[in-house]
């Protein structure tokens, strides 16, 4: 049985990531409604942030639903995939800075 403290921490992480996800989705909708180009850096960063937070929320929901479950592929993917998304975000940031400097 999982400890109560770890379940509370998982619930707090899940709630915080869900708030971040809702905020970024609202910001992305507002960007689209204001007429920003779909293939802009703002949309790219928003999309990657939505993907990153959705994977984090999925992981913490999985931890809350089945805290003592074995690490199957879904939990393993939800735990490690945000690292690749973070790398893609930093790569997009590098491309943005190079294009800005030139």
Image: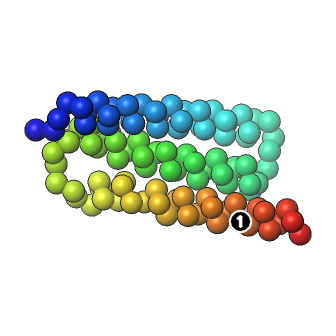
Looking at the image, residue 49 sits to the left or right of residue 18; the answer is right
Quadrant in the picture for the N terminus: top left
Residue at 21% in and 56% down: 71
Residue at 66% in and 51% down: 45
Question: Percent from the top left, x then y, of residue 27?
Answer: 67, 35
Question: Percent from the top left, x then y, of residue 62?
Answer: 28, 43
The part of the image, by quadrant, that contains residue 98 is: bottom right
Using the image as rendered, state which of residue 35 and residue 45 is in the foreground: 45
92 vs 57: above or below: below
Mark 1, Cα crowd under 10 Å, few <14 / some 14-19 / many 20+, is few
Residue marked by disc 1: 94
99 vs 51: above or below: below
Residue at 67% in and 62% down: 92
Using the image as rendered, state which of residue 89 and residue 27 is in the foreground: 89
Question: Percent from the top left, x then y, of residue 47?
Answer: 61, 50
Question: Percent from the top left, x then y, of residue 16?
Answer: 46, 33
The part of the image, by quadrant, that contains residue 13 is: top left
Looking at the image, residue 37 sits to the left or right of residue 27; the answer is right
Residue at 43% in and 49% down: 55
Q: How many numbered marks does the figure carry?
A: 1
């Amino acid at each position: 049985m999982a400890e109560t403290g770890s379940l509370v921490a998982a619930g707090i992480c899940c709630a915080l990531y869900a708030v971040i996800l809702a905020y970024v989705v609202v910001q992305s909708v507002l960007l689209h409604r204001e007429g920003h180009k779909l293939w802009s850096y703002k949309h790219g960063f928003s999309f990657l942030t939505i993907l990153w937070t959705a994977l984090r929320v999925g992981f913490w929901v999985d931890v809350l639903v089945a805290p003592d479950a074995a690490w199957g592929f879904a939990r393993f993917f939800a735990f490690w995939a945000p690292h690749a998304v973070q790398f893609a975000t930093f790569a997009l940031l590098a491309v943005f800075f190079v294009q800005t400097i030139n």
